Image (cartoon, helix red, strand yellow):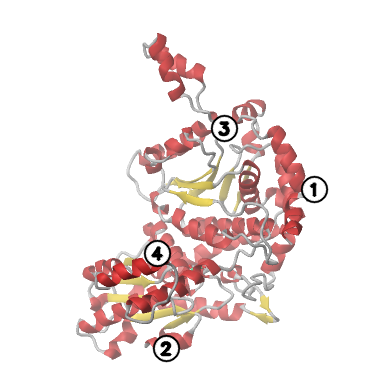
Amino acid sequence: MTTKTLLEHRETPAWRALAAYHAHFGETHLRTLFGDDPQRFERFSVGAAGLTLDYSKNRIDEHTMALLFELARERGVETARDKMFAGASINNTEGRAALHVALRSPVGTHIEIDGNDVMPTVLAMRERVGEFVEAVRSGRRTGYTGECFTDVVNIGIGGSDLGPAMACEALAAYGHARLNMHFVSNVDGDQLAAVLNRVDPARTLFVIASKTFTTIETMTNAASARTWFLASGASESDIARHFVAVSTDVAKVSDFGIDEANTFAFWDWVGGRYSMWSAVGLSIALWVGRDHFEAMLEGAHEMDRHFAESPIEVNMPVILAMLGIWYRNFFGTASVCIAPYAQALSRMPAYLQQLEMESNGKSVSRDGVPVSVATCPVVWGEPGTNGQHAFFQLLHQGTELIPVDFILPLKSAHDLPGHHRLLIANCIAQSKALMVGKTAEEVRAELVAAGMSGAALEALVPHRVFPGNRPSSTIVLPALTPRTLGALIALYEHKVFVQGVVWGINSFDQWGVELGKRLASRIGAELAGGPPCGGDASTRGLIALARAAGE
Ligand code: G6Q
C-alpha cells in the first residue's frame, strides 16, 4: 500500500522531471536570473481580483513553472477544483461538500448539494444577518435598559474566532464608531475576565459562535458570561436581547437558552476555518456594516471566479500553491513566513496558520495510505516592520531556507505623513535584500570605504556576507479594504486547496483537533474527582500535581 502511494507521487512524469530539473537548476542565484532577464517582473507577475502577485523573486524560470503546472494537471487540480465548485462530497472522511464558495456567491447563482440548491438558504441567512446588523448599528435594537450596544463580545474558538478576529482588526478603519469589538476564545478565564471587567452588561451584546455548540472552551465562556450578566441585575428574560448564537445545531443552542429568533444558522458543509463568510462573520458585519461585509464577500467571489475560470498558467492561487510545492517538496523547506506589511493584518499569520496547518497538516492520503512526500510546512510570521527587528536575521543569514510571503497594501487608512512610504520602502527593501544578499567583495568595499583595512577588515567579512538567493513572493493590494481582504483570504483558501490536491490529502477534515477535545474532557473529569482516565506515568503525575494544587 505504502509503496503504491510512493509511486503515485514520486514516479509520475512531472514529479520526476521536477526532481531532475531541481538538481540542475535549483542553486541558480536569483541575481543571475534577474541579470539575465530584464522582463522578469512582467514575466512572473499576475493580477486577479484587484491583487497583484509578484513571484519573480522565486527560484524559478519558465521551465520550472511549466513543469509545476504539468504537475498540477497530472495531480488533477482542475478536476478537483471543478468538483469543489459543483458541491461534490470532497470532504470524504466526513462525507460532506466543502462549499464555502457558495457563501460568497451572488444572487442568481445555483449551487447544488445532492440535487438541492443551497443558495436560497444562504441568501436568506445573509439577509437576516444584514437586518440584525443594521438594527444593532442604528441603535434600533438595544439592550434591556433601552441603551444602545457599545460592546460586542464574540465567544468562539478556532474557526469560530480566528477569521472574525483577524477581519475585524484588518478592517478597523471601517469599524462603527460606537462599537468596541472583543474576542474571547481561550478557556483560560483571564481572557474573559479582562473583557468582562471592561464592559457594561446593559450595553454588551454576546455573540456565541460555535459550529457544533459543544466545544468546551466556548460553552464554558458562554456559561460564565451568562452568569456574569445575570449577576449584574439582569433577568432571565433579558438574555434574549443580549445573547445571540451562530451554529449549525439550533437544538443545542436552544438547550443553552438562546431561542431560534436569536440564532443564525449555517451548515455542515461549511468547514470551521472556512466559515467567516457565513453567519460566523456576524461580528465582522456588526463591526463594518452590512455593505462592507458584503463587499468582502464580493472580493472573495471575484477570486473564486478567477480560480474557477483562469487557465492554470495565470491562475494566482495555483501559482502560489505550486511555488509552495516547489520549495517544500524539492528544496525540502520546512516552514514559510508570512510577513504582512500592515499592522492591521497582525492576526493574519495566526489565521493562515490554522487555514494551512489544520487543512494540510496530514500524513495520510485521501484513500487512507501514508503520504510519501512532505505535506504542509510550518506557517508563521509577524507584521513588518517589527519582524525586521526580530527574526529577519534568521531569514537573511540563518541556515534554513524559508520562503516569505510579503503582503503589501499600497495605501494606508491613516493620514500620518511619511509613515506609509517608509513601510512600503521597507517591504520592498527586505525582499530585495533577501534576493540579492551581499557578496564578500561588496562587504570589503563597504568596510574599506568606512576606513577599515587588514586583518580587522577580513575578520568581519564572513559575518557581514549575506548569501541572498532567499525566495519571496509579494502580494500587492491597492489598499486594505473589505473587498481586497476578501480576495486575499480566498486566494489563500484556494492555494491550500490546490496543495492538498497535489499531496493527495483531504484538506477539509481535522481529526487532530478532535483527539485533543476528547482527551481534555476525560482528564477534566478526573480533575473534578471522577475516575482515573488511566494512561501513562507523565499524565498521571501531572494530574496528581494539579489535584494537589486544588484543581
Ligand atoms: C476548524 C476546526 C476548529 C473549530 C473549533 C471550534 O476548521 O474544526 O478550529 O473551528 O474547534 O469548533 P466549533 O465552532 O464547533 O465550536
Relative to 176, 14 lies left or right:
right
Three-letter amino acid code at the position of disc 1: Pro
Which SS class for mark 4?
A: helix
Above or below, 520 against 343 in this view is below
Dot 1 crowding, Cα within 10 Å, few <14, some 14–19, many 20+: some
Residue designated by label 4: 538
Amino acid type indicated by mark 4: Ser
x 58%, y 56%: residue: 491
Residue 106 as seen in the image, left or right of residue 478:
right
Residue behind mark 3:
469
Q: Nearer the viewer, mark 4 or mark 2?
A: 4
Q: How much space separates mark 2 and mark 1, taking CA atoms? A: 55 Å
Question: Which of the two discs, 2 and 3, sits closer to the camera?
Answer: 3
Ranked by sequence position, the earlier of labels 2 and 3 is 2
Task: Give the residue type that dot 2 points to.
Answer: Ser
Residue at the extreme top of the image, as rendered:
454
Which residue is denoted by mark 1 in the rendering? 13
Q: Which residue is mark 2?
A: 254
Mark 3: secondary structure: loop
